[in-house]
Amino acid sequence: MSTFMAKAETIERKWYVLDAQGKPLGKVAAAAATILRGKNRPEFTPHVDCGEYVIVINADKAILTGKKLEQKKYRYHTGYIGGLKEIGYKELMSKNPEKAIFLAVKGMLPKNTIGRKSLLRLKVYAGEAHQHAAQQPENLEF
């Protein structure tokens, strides 16, 4: 008996909605990364992009446990000399909570073409409303 290998063109992708309200940011990101990668599917194949679409709502109501809100920093470099910038998560969660979830999920995906393609299927919204009702997304509890 041979091993089944999924093919990218035969995969049917579903849409899922994750509600981040009152849940830790890392748990939401881990659940989203698992679905985006396709690891929840029985036909998961590591070298094939067999993930699905994920919509994260209520990103502004996600919580950070412990002292992470005060102590955790997001650091990036502009590319210029002395261009290291940093922003605290307290400020990031108040100004742009979608970016906080996006960065957490991005860090959990592989750093290759499959990871970059998977990240395009992530949709994050700060509030309750999203514009993907036509895709008939399923609510996902985790």
Image: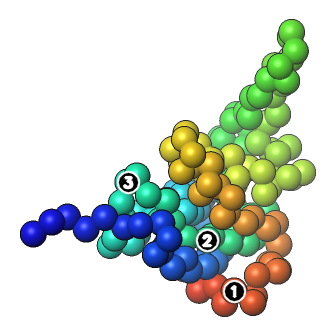
Which of the two residues, 21 or 139, is positioned nearer the viewer here?
A: 139
Q: Is there a contact, CB below 8 Å, between mark 1 and mark 2?
A: yes
Left or right: where 89 falls relative to 10 = right
- Quick one: quadrant of the N terminus? bottom left
Label 2 packing within 10 angstroms: few (<14), some (14-19), many (20+): many
> What residue did someone put label 3 on?
46
Task: Give me the C-alpha separation between circle 3 and circle 2.
Answer: 17 Å
Task: Give me the C-alpha separation between circle 1 and circle 2.
Answer: 10 Å
Which of the two residues, 53 or 87, is positioned nearer the viewer here?
A: 53
Mark with earlier residue (3, 2): 3
> What residue did someone put label 2 on?
53
Measured along the vertical axis of the image, is residue 2 above or below residue 130?
above
Q: Is there a contact, CB below 8 Å, between mark 3 and mark 2?
A: no
> What residue did someone put label 1 on?
135
Left or right: where 89 falls relative to 45 = right
The residue that appears at 57% across and 46% down in the rendered structure is 113
x then y, percent, for residue 118:
59, 57
